[in-house]
Amino acid sequence: MIAMQYQIALPDHYDMNLIRQRVRHNGMKTDGFEDLLFKAYLIRENQGGSEGGNEYSPLYLWKDSPGMIHFIWDGYYDNIVSSFGRQRVKLGIPIFVDLGKEFLTSRFMLETEQVIPASPKMVRPHFSAVGNSCTGKVLLCDPEQWVQKEYSFFGKKPDSSIEGTFYEVLHLSV
């Protein structure tokens, strides 16, 4: 398995309904895509606070690399390039994947990131506690940067006191 994500930063004044409409009309095009375990169409909106700007950040989890290669190099990624320019595609190695039976009901996702500390013995990363209300969890490792990323999916938005970045899930392709 391999994960990929590109994070498209959008201006604060950008009408995020344009992204919602884009996903509503095109999201199903990746349903059943070769080697795709899931694609989460994620957005984050600036609500006038200091938590950052608007963002469109699709997250993919591939069963195998041929499907990812097909997506990037055979015309599908061209839609992103023509609309937003070529984005930096971040890759991650899945350490743990748990997509519960309610995964497809996910409407929110929490992303957390932490540095994997150096130690004389490698210790497998693990999830921090985010409660039992998750509909799915994915733990990734980026060994180039030595960071772990946790993605926790929810049917309802969890308590905003939880540290991390919240995204709205517009569509899940499986």
Image: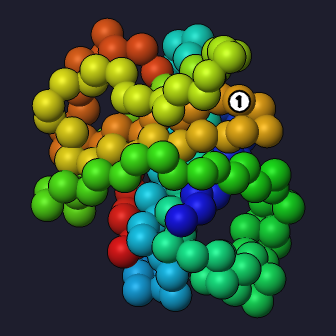
> On the rendered image, what quadrant is the C terminus found in?
bottom left
Residue ranking furthest to the right: 86
Q: In this view, does 47 lie to the left or right of 129?
A: right
Identity of the residue drawn at 72% across and 80% down: 69
Q: Which amino acid does label 1 sit on?
A: Trp
Residues 77 and 36: in front is: 36
Q: Position of residue 163 (x, y in %)?
A: 42, 14
Foreground residue among 146 and 7: 146
Specify whether 26 is left or right of 88: left
Determine whether, in the image, residue 145 is placed left or right of residue 36: right
Q: Position of residue 109 (x, y in %)?
A: 37, 40
> Label 1, on which residue?
146
**For this rendering, which residue is in front, 57 or 45?**
57
Residue visible at 66% across and 15% down in the picture: 119
Q: Is residue 162 above or below residue 137?
A: above
Residue at 57%, 32% (x, y): give it: 148
Q: In this rendering, does residue 11 appear at all?
A: yes
Q: What crowding class fits label 1: few (fewer than 14 Cα within 10 Å), some (14-19), or many (20 or more)?
A: few
Left or right placement of residue 42 versus residue 110 in this view = right
